[in-house]
Amino acid sequence: MQTTHLFLGSIGVLAETSDIQRRAYNAALSEAGVPWEWNPDTYRSLLSMSGGQDRLRMLADATNTELSDATIVEIHRRKTEIACAEVVATPVELRPGVADVIAHALDNGIRLGLVTSTYLPNIEAIAEAAGGQLPLDRFDVVVSRADVACGKPAPDAYLHALHTTGADPATTIAIEDTATSALAARGAGIRTIVVPGRFTDDQIVVGADAIVPALSVETVFGLVPITA
């Protein structure tokens, strides 16, 4: 069987924005009067959990910090506003090979999806920065954290994408950048390639079909062949 669908699994697969997100969190937390400041090593450890609001709730519980849901939502909204402005202004570029993989899929009738644990403004900012290299209007599905009850590592986002597109997991490939997110794709029965980013290259990845340093047409469609 031929590969029919390719699901790009995180904004970290698309572009290196982790340090922008970290600085934006620090600014938003400071504005909200929350006494947390995350250095790069701390943020690396926090990326073991997907989803910004979920991450804030987890850390509040772990540190006995009282943060209401409304405060968490507002901190995350403000973080997103700050980060998106920098992503567009820089502008952030797509990671090596991403544009080639997307173009190859479109040229060969492979249907595309974006399956993330983030929210639409972050996705739209990267698409704006990337210009025509990330044509979201040609993706069959874009899943954000708002679309599912449980974020990654639960498989909900991928199951939603499979259901929406009618894709067969056996002929679908997912690309992820973290160990947690890879578990979500594998939990949905999808073959998974992990391409770690600068903030996730120390994670221990279990169950992925391939781990590669960078994306290319060969690494995506060659290392994980779909066979009958």
Image (cartoon, rainbow, N blue to C red):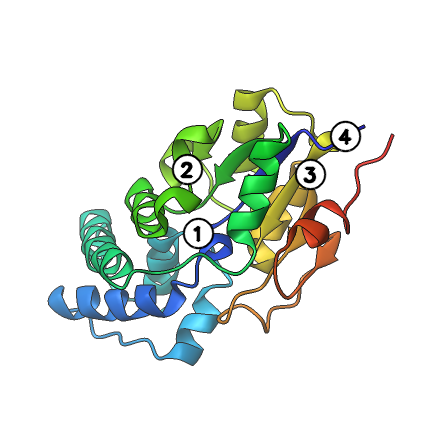
Q: Name the residue tied to disc 3.
A: 190
Q: How far across and how far down the image is residue 39, in percent?
A: 35, 80
Q: CA distance from mark 1 to mark 4?
A: 26 Å
Q: Amino acid at mark 3?
A: Ile
Instruction: Report the residue at 71% width, 37% height from top.
Output: 189
Q: Earlier in the sequence, mark 4 or mark 3?
A: 4
- What secondary structure is found at the residue carrying circle 1? helix
In x, y percent, where is residue 223? Answer: 77, 51
For the residues labelled 3 and 2, the Cα–Cα distance comes to 23 Å
In the image: residue 19, left or right of residue 209: left
- Rendered position, 216 above or below 103: below
Q: Residues within 10 Å of mark 4 (few under 14, many from 20)?
A: few
Residue type for callout 2: Pro
The residue singled out by tag 2 in the image is: 135
Between disc 2 and disc 1, the foreground one is 2
Q: Residues within 10 Å of mark 2 (few under 14, many from 20)?
A: some
Please report whichever mark, 1 or 3, sits nearer to the chain's N-terminal start.
Answer: 1
1 or 4: tag closer to the N-terminus: 4
Q: Position of residue 136 (x, y in %)?
A: 40, 35
Which of the two residues, 59 or 185, is positioned nearer the viewer here?
A: 185
Residue wearing tag 4: 2
